[in-house]
Image (tube, helix red, strand yellow):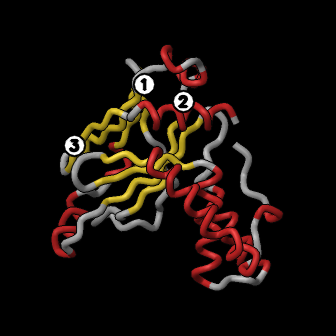
Amino acid sequence: MKPIGRGEILGLADYETIRERFRGRVIAEKKLRRVSLGPSVSALFENRDTVLLQIQEMLRTERITRSAAIAHEIDTYNAQIPGDDELSLTLMIAIEDHAERDAFLQAAVGFEEHVWLTAGDERIKAQGPARGSESSERTTAVHYLKFRLPPATAAALRGPAPTRPTLALETDHPAYTARAVLAPATVACIAEDLQD
């Protein structure tokens, strides 16, 4: 999937003119791409539109207009765009109670090492960015992960809907185990991403 280019980013005034329509369309798309993984974790399969929305909204919220700062946001968020035969996932731990969340983040150290995508009989481990500065005493509430699909799995997902493998997202961390089978609409979004 092609990274977001500087020419695709609208200035703040121009973005305001299309924001409601664009944001509404991408939020509807995100609903199809979101997966609940047990009671406390949700995941979003990212694509160019979801990343473009994040960039535009960050620029809008932070009132970023300097070229270097815009380039930094583009570079930062482009890391979430999946590469060839790859799926990109933003995984969020959502526990409202502060003390409960803090205890969980401490108990779930290494959480990102326990996230899997299953495709039929294939089990694919999530890969995350190197976190050299991350504390070994707690995990983060947000993880940016990717799944590198074996060629046969990617090819099967590009095929017609009836021949696609069943996909599921799993975590097997001792502090939190859950499994969620992806809805057909979510699999269709993923299959479309792999066409790009």
Comparing 85 with 165, the one in front is 165
Residue 145: where, in percent of width, then height? 48, 49
Does residue 28 lie above or below 13 as drawn? above
For residue 149, the mark is: 2
Quadrant hosting residue 50: bottom right
Does residue 157 lie above or below 60 as drawn? above
The local secondary structure at tag 2 comes to: loop
For residue 177, the mark is: 3
For residue 41, the mark is: none
The local secondary structure at tag 3 comes to: strand
Amino acid under disc 3: Thr
Kindly identify the residue that appears in the image at 21 percent across and 62 percent down: 104
Kindly identify the residue that appears in the image at 19 percent across and 46 percent down: 174
Real-space Cα distance between discs 1 and 3? Answer: 18 Å
Does residue 106 lie above or below 173 as drawn? below
Residue 130: where, in percent of width, then height? 51, 55
Amino acid under disc 1: Ala
Quadrant hosting residue 8: bottom right
Kindly identify the residue that appears in the image at 51 percent across and 44 percent down: 146
Comparing 181 with 68, the one in front is 181
